[in-house]
């Protein structure tokens, strides 16, 4: 017995378990064409959010369609160890227990990290099952599991031995909260309101010596120089003041020295074209240790580097003052002291861009640090070329420009992180600082003994680097490492599944991850890692704001599934999520998705509730409806496949939605529906059941649960059978003539219904229709359906106009005689208003068509539609004018 209402809770867990029990998502290499997707691994300690919902729904749509197309569909799930995020959570947990990471040591800390991971890791993968994700769960991988860990270490050693990895002191983005370097791509720039402080530096006393080539200042010259800065807490790290050599204001100071306020240290006044004369005072404080541009100036002018900020963002002993104070607290204290001692000239409100750590939201501190780097220039070239030539295709293609901007001149990748949770760098140090890079300590010892003849050396003489590798250094191998393609490059699985087919991800990690995976693919297998990259947009709230916990504008995806059902949420999100465009999420989208599910369910109940008659019947209207819907289904299938081929997933869903809601439920079922307590003929019923089955297969990738439930109910099925693995509907012939005829039929029916509604005539009142057409046979064929859908008393074919309310469709005139049903005086007034409106509409179309630029640049079908509108409007004006003239006689 089919339930009256559709309740997702009754079926979703049931069918998901059924799919798992029958191993319908499992994939092993065979003779079929593979279709492979690797999941963008979410953080192991993360939970499902709206971005995951969108991303994984699209992946599931693609993988389910491929599975139904007979391909060996393999969707590999997994999680990322997320060094910074996970370590921060473990550190916070330990703090609550009164424990400090440094005090308990690395080994004990990692025990806590693994305990945390085992407790909370993988929750998100369980949540994805609620969404209906059809992953091969037996293949679940984790970036810190032994096989993947070894792969990362092997790659590091290989690249180091090839001279691609080096260690050096560079200016990096330092996260004082995470106490680690982060990459440029992990820095979020925000515009911040700050105070621009104008600070006076006194000019040092200068004695004229023999050989001096500068003059002492004149008595009128000021005895100070003023700089403007938003970072007064770094003045103690200044090693010069720079001015533009062409700036007349400061030429008398070239070669002189200034004195840093508060600490009274002398620094040189240097000249450099880099300084902008019209910004601030035209004088630049040069702080090589705490600004990347100043660092470059320092190298150019051989300036010393004074690093005054600790790893945690506090001032160190080199600052001389406010030692141990947080940098921002020190800023306030220094400004106050500068003001008290009359070094502060003034402050101004000033907006500037400030970098924040994407992971901890701490303000980034530019810092000189000894780090490990990967040379990118040579490695990036194949990855750049093969995206530009579409060997790897980005969808939408507009993201090629973003990709180009990064890949044309890539910076060396800072791959080390000052953390303990992650892949520990396989570099081992001898007591004299010599570096031995090897897979483990044992191999490092052998290497040292072999290369340096240090046979008395023991493992105790080797110290491993404390740092771990950037999380992205493991995930850039993901399409290969999940199939063990790094350790065993010729194994059967990597040979079968690689390269993968489609990557679905957010465009915000195009540099973090997408580009680096392509680089790795060509570096280690000389192959692309995937054929297509589908970029999703960002899920925002309906006001356009990014969803966040702080704003409280992000719904819990599981609550949405509980309320609207997984199919409702899936279709709701995809209704308006074109590739690469942000999705403005409104819960009404999920409501629309649920309504769509209910519409499908009610249509199924309607059809299954009909009584079927085996008796012969002369029902040409039903035959016509069946023929029309067959062509309409095939036409939509062609559209859907085209949308899929172009990665227009939202458009594919919209086509299916319109086909099911409008064409099948609202039109087709209405045409074939038997009268009250009347049976339906068997051929029509069988055709309808067949249509329903094909529609469920068509919709299955988008709404897997309800389609499985209905598919199982349509016919008797064998145990283990599932819609998951039946064939995706194939296209058949399209009768364009019948499609055009039915468009005309629906237009006529709509006009008659509008007339009926406007005159408040009941839906059961039969009305006469007269048709003045050059091709009446076309309408004679459609007559049975015209009668049924428009509730007509009669259809008459005429040569001359007759009385009645008229309308025009593509040159044909239609008259509905409502004598006795309407107020003629009111009808004439309405006709006059309609005439005036139609004349205005015609004139607007004429204006558009008289614009040569529009006609030349618009698509031909757009111009044709406008011309058809003009023809229809002119025909309607003619009819209305005739109607008013006839009434005036």
Image: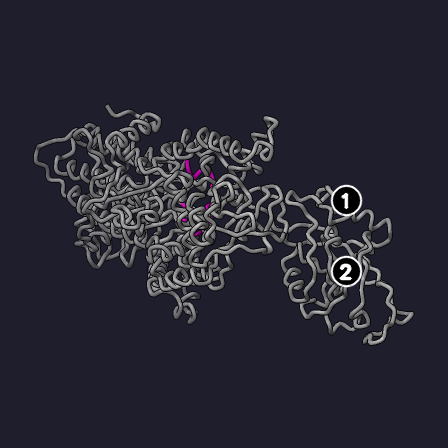
15 horizontally vs 557: left or right: left
Label 2 crowding class (10 Å Cα cut-off): few <14, some 14-19, many 20+? some
Quarter of the image with the C terminus in it: bottom left
Which comes sooner in the sequence, label 2 or label 1? 2
For the point 43% across and 60% down, the residue is 380
Whether residue 658 can be seen here: no
Which one is nearer the viewer's eye here, 232 or 813?
Answer: 232
Query: Image quadrant of residue 724?
Result: top left
Residue 322 numbered mark, or none: 1
| Bounds of the magenta segment | 576-590
Q: Residue sitting at 39 percent across and 36 percent down?
A: 569
Residue 484, how many percent across, how many down?
Answer: 33, 45
How far from the left and from the top, in percent, is residue 291? Answer: 65, 56
Residue at 62% over, 48% down: 364
Q: Is residue 766 above or below residue 249?
A: above
Residue farthest to the front, as pictured: 456
Kind of element beneath mark 2? strand
Q: Which of the pair 47/254 is nearer the observer?
A: 254
Q: Which of labels 2 and 1 is toward the front? A: 1
Is residue 673 among what the camera can see?
Answer: yes
Query: Residue 85: x and y, percent?
Result: 52, 39
Disc 2 target residue: 227
């Amino acid at each position: 017995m089919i339930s009256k209402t559709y309740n997702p809770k009754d079926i979703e867990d049931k069918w998901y378990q059924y799919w798992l029990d029958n191993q319908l998502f499992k994939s092993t290499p065979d003779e079929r064409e593979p279709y492979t997707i690797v999941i963008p691994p979410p953080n192991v300690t993360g939970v499902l959010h709206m971005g995951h919902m969108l991303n994984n729904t699209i992946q599931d749509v693609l993988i389910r369609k491929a599975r139904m197309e007979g391909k060996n569909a393999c969707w590999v799930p997994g999680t990322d160890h997320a060094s910074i995020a996970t370590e921060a959570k473990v550190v916070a947990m330990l703090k609550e227990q009164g424990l400090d990471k440094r005090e308990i040591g690395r080994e004990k800390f990692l025990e806590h990290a693994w305990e945390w991971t085992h407790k909370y890791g993988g929750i998100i993968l369980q949540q994805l099952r609620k969404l209906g994700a059809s992953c091969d769960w037996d293949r679940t991988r984790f970036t810190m599991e032994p096989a993947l860990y070894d792969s990362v270490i092997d790659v590091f050693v290989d690249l180091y031995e090839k001279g691609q990895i080096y260690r050096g002191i560079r200016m990096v983005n330092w996260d004082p909260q995470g106490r680690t370097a982060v990459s440029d791509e992990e820095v979020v720039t925000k515009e911040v309101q700050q105070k621009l402080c104008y600070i006076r530096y006194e000019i040092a006393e200068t004695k004229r010596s023999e050989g001096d080539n500068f003059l002492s200042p004149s008595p009128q010259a000021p005895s100070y120089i003023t700089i403007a800065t938003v970072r007064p807490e770094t003045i103690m790290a200044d090693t010069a003041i720079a001015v533009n050599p062409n700036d007349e204001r400061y030429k008398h100071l070239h070669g002189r020295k200034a004195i840093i306020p508060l600490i009274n240290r002398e620094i040189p006044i240097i000249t450099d074209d880099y300084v902008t004369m019209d910004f601030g005072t035209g004088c630049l404080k040069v702080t090589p240790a705490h600004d990347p541009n100043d660092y470059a100036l320092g190298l150019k002018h051989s300036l010393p580097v004074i690093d005054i900020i600790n790893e945690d963002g506090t001032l160190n002993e080199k600052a001389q003052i406010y030692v141990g104070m947080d940098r921002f607290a020190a800023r306030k204290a220094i400004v106050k002291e500068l003001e008290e001692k009359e070094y502060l000239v003034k402050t101004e409100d000033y907006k500037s861009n400030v970098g924040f750590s994407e992971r901890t939201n701490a303000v980034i501190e530019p810092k000189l640090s000894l780090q490990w780097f990967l040379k990118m220039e040579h490695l990036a070239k194949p990855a750049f070329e093969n995206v530009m030539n579409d060997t790897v295709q980005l969808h939408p293609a507009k993201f090629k420009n973003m990709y180009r901007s990064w890949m044309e001149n890539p910076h060396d990748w800072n791959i080390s992180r000052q953390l303990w949770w992650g892949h520990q760098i396989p570099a081992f140090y001898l007591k004299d600082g010599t570096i031995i890079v090897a897979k483990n300590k044992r191999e490092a010892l052998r290497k040292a003994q072999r290369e340096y003849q240090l046979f008395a050396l023991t493992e105790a003489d080797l110290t491993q680097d404390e740092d771990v590798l950037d999380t992205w250094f493991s995930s850039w191998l993901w399409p290969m490492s999940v199939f063990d393609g790094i350790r065993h490059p010729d194994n059967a699985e990597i040979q079968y599944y690689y390269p993968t087919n489609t990557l679905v991800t957010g465009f915000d990690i195009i540099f973090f991850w997408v580009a680096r995976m392509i680089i790795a693919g060509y570096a280690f297998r000389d192959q692309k890692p995937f054929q297509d990259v589908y970029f999703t947009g960002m899920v925002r709230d309906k006001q356009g704001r990014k969803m966040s916990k702080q704003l409280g504008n992000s719904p819990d995806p599981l609550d949405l599934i509980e309320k609207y059902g997984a199919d409702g949420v899936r279709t709701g999100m995809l209704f308006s999520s074109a590739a690469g465009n942000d999705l403005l999420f409104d819960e009404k989208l999920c409501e629309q998705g649920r309504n769509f599910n209910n519409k499908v369910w009610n249509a199924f109940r309607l059809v299954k509730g009909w009584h079927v008659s085996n008796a012969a019947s002369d029902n040409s209207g039903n035959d016509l409806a069946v023929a029309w819907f067959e062509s309409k289904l095939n036409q939509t299938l062609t559209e859907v496949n085209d949308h899929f081929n172009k990665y227009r997933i939202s458009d594919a869903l919209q086509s299916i939605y319109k086909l099911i809601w409008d064409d099948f439920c609202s039109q087709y079922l209405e045409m074939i529906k038997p009268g009250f307590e009347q049976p339906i003929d068997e051929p029509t019923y069988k055709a309808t059941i067949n249509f329903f089955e094909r529609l469920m297969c068509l919709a299955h990738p988008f709404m897997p649960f309800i389609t499985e439930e209905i598919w199982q109910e349509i016919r008797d099925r064998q145990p283990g059978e599932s819609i998951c693995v039946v064939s995706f509907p194939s296209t058949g012939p399209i009768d364009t003539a019948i499609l055009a005829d039915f468009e005309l039929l629906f237009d006529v029916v709509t006009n008659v219904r509008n007339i009926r509604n406007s005159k408040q005539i009941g839906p059961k009142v039969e009305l006469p229709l007269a048709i003045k057409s050059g091709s009446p046979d076309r309408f004679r064929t459609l007559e049975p359906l015209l009668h049924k859908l428009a509730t007509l008393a009669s259809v008459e074919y005429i040569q001359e106009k007759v009385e009645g309310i008229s309308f025009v469709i593509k040159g044909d005139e239609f008259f509905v005689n409502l004598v006795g049903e309407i107020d003629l005086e009111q009808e004439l007034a309405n006709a006059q208003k309609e005439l005036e409106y139609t004349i205005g509409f015609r004139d607007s179309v004429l204006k558009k068509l008289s614009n040569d630029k529009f006609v030349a640049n618009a698509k031909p079908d757009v111009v044709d539609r406008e011309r058809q509108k003009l023809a229809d409007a002119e025909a309607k004006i003619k009819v209305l004018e005739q109607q008013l003239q006839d009434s005036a006689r």
